[in-house]
Amino acid sequence: MKQTDRTRLAGVLRFIPAVIWMAVIFMLSSRTGDEVGSLLPFFQQFFPSMESFDWGHYVSYFVLAAAIDFGIGKRADRLVWKVAIVLLCGLYGVTDEYHQSFVGGRTPDIMDIRNDMIGAAVWVLLISIPPLRKLWRKF
């Protein structure tokens, strides 16, 4: 295998965490409204003020943005890639909401897409802090 082929393969393999995390999001979105509601009391033991799983959108898409950033590598430090990461997460959020329209007890919500993009944007802003970016790029 040529060096360029190995480099390309390594670049593709860096996106595996993002694909896996997208599958996790898809799986969680496949839960019916009753299944999701039945999990809430468990989490309320640890977070008593939690009233819904809306925070899950922020966290899930924060992680997705990190995984996409990892896949892109150092190029993600450029503004155009930062914007692309947030937009890709938003686009996946749109497909996620569409998917939920077919799941019992779940409905698509534009506010969820907003929350998805906020989670992704928080990642992009956080990783723009030079000491954090330097540490992340070592990883």
Image (spheres, helix red, strand yellow):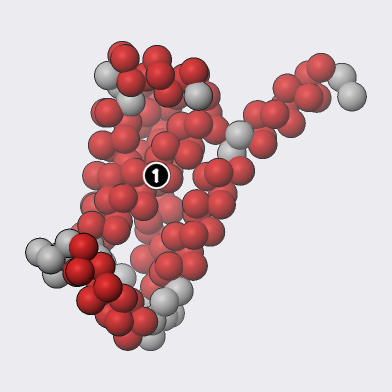
Q: Circle 1 sits in a helix, a strand or a loop, which is it?
A: helix
Q: Residue at x 61, y 34 (%)?
A: 14
Picture quarter containing residue 54? bottom left
Q: Residue at x 31, y 35 (%)?
A: 123
Q: Tell me if residue 104 comes above or below residue 116 in the rendering.
A: below
Q: What is the x, y in percent for residue 41?
A: 23, 76
Q: Determine if residue 57 is in view.
A: yes
Picture quarter containing residue 30? bottom left
Considering every residue shown, the one lying at the far front of the view is 45
Q: What is the x, y in percent for residue 96?
A: 41, 63
Q: Label 1 amino acid?
A: Val
Whether residue 110 sits left or right of residue 8 in the image: it is left
Q: Which residue is mark 1?
A: 63
Q: What is the x, y in percent for residue 38?
A: 30, 82
Foreground pick, 50 / 101: 50
Q: Tell me if residue 59 comes above or below residue 129 in the rendering.
A: below
Foreground pick, 92 / 65: 65
Q: Tell me if residue 35 comes above or below residue 62 in the rendering.
A: below
Considering every residue shown, the one lying at the far left of the view is 49
Whether residue 67 sits left or right of residue 49 in the image: it is right
Picture quarter containing residue 17? top right
Q: What is the x, y in percent for residue 92?
A: 43, 53
Q: Residue at x 24, y 44 (%)?
A: 118
Quarter of the picture holding the N terminus: top right
